[in-house]
Image (cartoon, grey):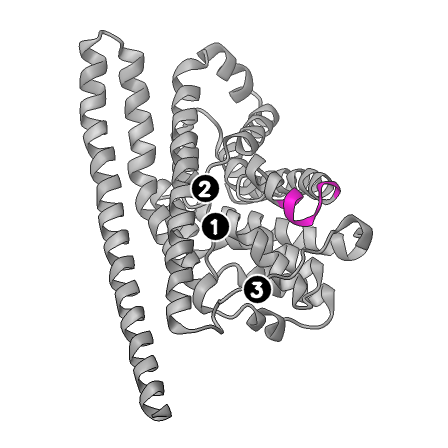
């Protein structure tokens, strides 16, 4: 009887997992196709309606907005798929086993891990907190927090598509972002204090060590949350970029674009305010064609590391004092790294 019950339970778990897989695939395919179809229809009808209303600026706004959204949605979908899979199926304890015990040596290793472990900036904060709970040095966890959403393969491929024929921009983003993450980790090793960091409390999850059904449930829930959440920020960021391109007078732009330093600082501040997802920010940066390559590089380096939603997430996870100090220093280091790398490569 016990053997029959065990076999029946295993069969039930397998059937549940299959059903969850089918539902997830249907959700991804239908959702992605629907979003692309809607964006395509809007991109066609929007300018036509705007022209009929004799408002050329609105037509131009629609053109910029839909171009950013249509280009960004596929990479956003791919990024959230990989991020959800990492969160559901890869045990977080694997990081602590691979990192050196010396914090100074663990920082560059953790930073480089972001190259092969995709994830959005929203997911990097709880992952970093989980690593700290498992004994990973805070400096290494913070380096991973900054690098994972900035230099993962999805982001780098999206950057190459947004800047066709410009491999130097992709390399510059990789070098500047990784340098920022490693420098911030080393700064924490040297100057960080335990009282500044409120370690997150443990929580019970049914992650990679749980049942198959639980893992697929976590995957589907993570995919839905990340895609809808990041998709909303993509739409808002695309709208803000379109408004910026259309509404800001050319004379104001000339004031900033005429100065290398002012243009870098302006886009670095905009990156904080716009809160564009890292899988799509390259398309927003490419649309800001009036600015220098170094300024657009600063936009892409600062955005995945310091923006309003990340500051809020860090404040809720690690404490307000930590978020203020860490975000401010990260912004400065990211801007300096962008300027130096841009001068070197661009």
> Which residue appears farthest toward the top when viewing the image?
54
* Residue on which disc 1 sits: 120
**Residue 71: % across, % down:** 31, 39
- Mark drawn on residue 277: 2
Looking at the image, how many numbered discs can be counted on the residues? 3
Q: Nearer the viewer, residue 130 or 59?
A: 130
Whether tag 2 and tag 1 are in contact, CB under 8 A, the answer is yes
Q: Neighbour class for label 2 at 10 Å: few (<14), some, many (≥20)?
A: many
Q: How far apart are the alpha carbons under marks 1 and 3?
A: 22 Å
**Label 3 CA crowd tier, 10 Å (few <14, some 14–19, many 20+):** few
Which badge, 2 or 1, comes first in the chain's sequence? Answer: 1
Q: Residue at x 75, y 41 (%)?
A: 321
In terms of secondary structure, where does tag 2 sit? loop
Q: Are marks 1 and 3 in contact (CB under 8 Å)?
A: no
Circles 3, 2 touching at the beta carbon (< 8 Å): no
Q: Main structural element of the magenta stretch: helix, strand or loop?
A: helix
Alpha carbon of mark 2 to alpha carbon of mark 1: how far? Answer: 7 Å
Say which quarter of the image contains residue 101. Answer: bottom right
Q: Which mark is residue 314?
A: none
Q: Quadrant of residue 286?
A: top left
Residue 142 is one of the magenta-drawn residues: no
Q: Which residues are magenta?
A: 314-321
- Residue 161 percent location from the top left of the image: 34, 45
Q: Nearer the viewer, mark 3 or mark 2?
A: 3
N-terminal of the two: label 1 or label 3?
1
For marks 3 and 2, give the CA distance: 28 Å
């Amino acid at each position: 009887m016990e053997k029959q019950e065990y076999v029946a339970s295993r069969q039930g778990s397998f059937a549940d997992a299959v059903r969850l897989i089918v539902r997830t695939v249907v959700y991804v395919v239908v959702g992605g196709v629907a979003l692309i179809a809607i964006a395509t229809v809007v991109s066609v009808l929007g300018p036509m309606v705007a022209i009929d209303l004799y408002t050329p600026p609105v037509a131009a706004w629609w053109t910029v907005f839909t171009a950013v959204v249509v280009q960004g949605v596929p990479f956003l979908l791919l990024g959230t798929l990989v991020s959800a899979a990492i969160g559901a199926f890869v045990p977080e304890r694997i990081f602590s086993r691979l990192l050196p015990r010396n914090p100074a040596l663990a920082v560059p290793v953790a930073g480089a891990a972001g190259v092969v472990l995709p994830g959005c900036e929203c997911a990097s904060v709880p992952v970093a907190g989980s690593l700290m709970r498992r004994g990973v040095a805070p400096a290494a966890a913070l380096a991973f927090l900054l690098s994972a959403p900035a230099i993962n393969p999805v982001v780098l491929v999206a950057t190459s598509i947004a800047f066709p024929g410009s491999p130097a921009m992709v390399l510059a983003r990789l070098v500047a972002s990784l340098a920022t993450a490693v420098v911030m980790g080393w700064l924490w090793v040297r100057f960080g204090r335990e009282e500044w960091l409120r370690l997150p409390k443990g929580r019970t999850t049914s992650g990679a060590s749980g049942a198959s059904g639980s893992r697929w449930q976590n995957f589907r829930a993570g995919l839905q949350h990340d895609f809808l959440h990041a998709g909303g920020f993509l739409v808002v960021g695309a709208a803000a970029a379109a408004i910026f391109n259309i509404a800001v007078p050319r004379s104001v732009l000339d004031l900033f674009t005429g100065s290398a330093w002012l243009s870098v600082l302006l886009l670095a501040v905009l990156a904080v305010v716009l809160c564009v997802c890292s899988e799509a920010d390259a398309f927003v940066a490419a649309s800001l064609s009036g600015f220098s390559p170094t300024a657009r590089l600063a936009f892409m380096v600062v955005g995945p590391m310091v923006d309003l939603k990340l500051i809020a997430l860090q404040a809720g996870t690690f404490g307000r004092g930590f978020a203020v100090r860490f975000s401010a220093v990260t912004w400065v280091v990211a801007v300096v790294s962008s300027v130096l790398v841009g001068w070197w490569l661009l």
